[in-house]
Image: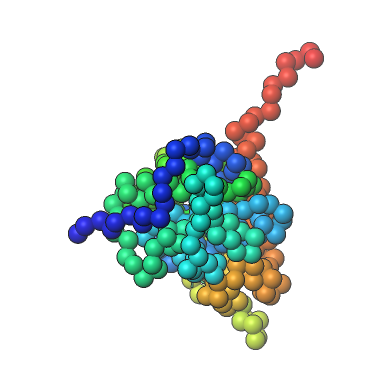
Amino acid sequence: MTESAPPNDLPTTQQEPAPLADVRHTIAVGAGKGGVGKSTVAVLAAVGLARRGFRVGLLDADVYGPSLPKLTGTEGCHLGLDERGRVRPAEADGLKLVSMGHLIDPNQAVIWRGPMAQKYVKEFLDRTNWGGLDYLLVDLPPGTGDIPLTLAQSFPLTGAVVVSTPQPVALQDAVRALRMYQKLGVEPLGIVENMSYYLCPHCGHRDEIFSHGGAAKAAQELGVPFLGAIPLNVALRAAGDAGRPAATFAEVEPYVMEALNDFVERLRGAVEAQGRKRMPLPQIPPGR
Ligand code: ADP
């Protein structure tokens, strides 16, 4: 099996500014396994933070299955370069977006080994002109294999969020992912339970299709924050399929909106707590 040729639309520049110098918080969004809604949750976090007035970017580092272009309606957008040769992100609903999916044909299979994937994610990190961000969310590939591990080490992270469904099999992998981040010295910002429950829009009956509450329990056992429970919801799925990120908040039932806002507030709280840990208050000597 040969590796895919790298996309050639990223010419080199002579002058490289400091990577992520204009980004306040870089948050990895990971998962123990695929299909738990990791990319969707990254978009929900981004939209929720942007609705609070923050400047938000999303970097799709899931180089093998880049789904952010689809989820944000930016498929087919070609990334331009600024006058200094830096990548100009695509934009959707006020979010700045960079994805491998903006460089390659979405139907093309990417066959890269770890170092190649790392090289390209690093290129995006070093060479994107984000234009100043409060939050950069990085959608990492799922799992604890070589690729997510290498990528998580490639750039400075404020911390990592792990997405899981409530099923034991998903949670087991989520715990493994969280431990991987801890071993890498990446602060776990917490676990969020996606597809946590389903409320029938017609009769209001509540179903816990994939079970419920496992992420809160796992978070407690691991001593990391629980970041909330996001319901399985048709409007969320439809917003993703239509590539309309803002609709995830604007066009959902009030209980969904409440759950999303709760998640975003918990995430913000975890990031702020992490910031305080990194910069402890100065100790005032006694007697002053
Ligand atoms: P992953 O990144 O983990 O592979 P995605 O975010 O691509 O997963 O989600 C997989 C599918 O599940 C998408 O079609 C998405 O719209 C849908 N989905 C994710 N979370 C929810 C949710 N809470 N409610 C309804 N659909 C969801």
Residue 120: where, in percent of width, then height? 39, 49
User: Which residue sits at x=75%, y=15%?
Assistant: 286
- Farthest residue in the right direction? 288
Tell me if residue 97 comes above or below residue 232 in the rendering.
above
Q: Is residue 16 visible?
A: yes
The quarter of the image holding the N terminus is: bottom left
Residue 88: where, in percent of width, then height? 54, 53
- Farthest residue in the front direction? 83
- Farthest residue in the bottom direction? 202
Count of numbered marks: 0
Give 245 or 186, whichever is nearer the viewer: 245
User: Which residue sits at x=60%, y=67%?
Assistant: 245
Residue 209: where, in percent of width, then height? 50, 75
- Farthest residue in the top direction? 287
Residue 83: where, in percent of width, then height? 54, 47
Give 270 or 152, whichever is nearer the viewer: 152
Q: Could you tell whether 128 is left or right of 95 in the image?
A: left
Tell me if residue 9 comes above or below residue 259 in the rendering.
above
User: Which residue sits at x=63%, y=31%?
Assistant: 279
Q: Could you tell whether 9 is left or right of 52 in the image?
A: left
Tell me which corner region of the image, top left, top right, bottom left or bottom right, holds residue 20: top right
